Image (cartoon, grey):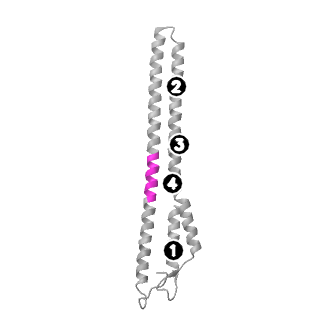
Amino acid sequence: MKLDMLIDELQEIVDNSSKVPFLGGKRAVNVERLQEIVDEMRTNMPQEVRQAKNIAADRSNILAKSKQEAETIVQQAEERAKGMVERSEITRQAQMRAAEIISKANEEAGAIKKAASDYIDDIMRKAENSLSSNLASVKKTRQSFKAFQAKSGSGRKGGRRTEEE
């Protein structure tokens, strides 16, 4: 995933940065590149959320289309049944066929709804897992960075603080 690569690149920048003499272990980094990476992370992270919203919209469209198809099938069945009213046996058969069509349409609509719900749930679960993983990685990197800062900051001579601290 692109976000993972960006986090790795941030770590690499920190790992490969050089120490600045006389600043208590502080490091020099390319701030512009760090900003570019952060901007790319912001751009790439919401993509999964947008994808989940699109899937939810697609689900609504699928359900609306299924409902419309079911209504069309029912309407067609009613029209056929009206045309066959001349004889009782034909009428009975038409009513049975209409019931079958309605039942089949309801089953298909239910199956489409379940499949769409399962698909959306799967995508949302994957997005949640990915975001959780990325958040955990960022937290771990931040903790490592804080520990590094704390470790680097304890080696100052004379106990003097600079304005940056």
Amino acid tagged 2: Ile
Instruction: State the residue position of label 4.
Output: 48
Secondary element at image label 2: helix
Sequence-wise, the earlier of marks 4 and 1 is: 1
Whether residue 126 is in magenta: the answer is yes
Instruction: State the residue position of label 1.
Output: 12
From mark 2 to mark 4, how far is it between C-alphas? 37 Å
Residue found 48% across the figure and 16% down from its top: 94
- Is 51 located above or below residue 58 in the figure? below
Amino acid tagged 3: Asp
Sequence-wise, the earlier of marks 3 and 1 is: 1
Q: Do the residues labelled 1 and 2 touch (CB within 8 Å)?
A: no
Instruction: Out of 104 and 126, give the one closest to the viewer.
Output: 126
From mark 1 to mark 2, how far is it between C-alphas? 61 Å
Q: Position of residue 2 (x, y in %)?
A: 53, 62
Classify mark 2: residues with Cα within 10 Å, few (<14), some (14-19) or many (20+).
some
Sequence-wise, the earlier of marks 2 and 4 is: 4
Secondary element at image label 3: helix
Instruction: State the residue position of label 3.
Output: 58
Q: Do the residues labelled 2 and 4 touch (CB within 8 Å)?
A: no
Sequence-wise, the earlier of marks 3 and 2 is: 3
Amino acid tagged 4: Glu
- Point out the stretch of residues depicted in magenta: 120-131
From mark 4 to mark 1, how far is it between C-alphas? 25 Å
Residue found 53% across the figure and 30% down from its top: 68
- Judged from this view, the residue extending furthest toward the bottom is 158
Q: Where is residue 161 in the image (x, y as percent from the top left)?
A: 45, 85
Instruction: State the residue position of label 2.
Output: 73
Secondary element at image label 4: helix
From mark 3 to mark 1, how far is it between C-alphas? 40 Å
Residue found 44% across the figure and 26% down from its top: 103
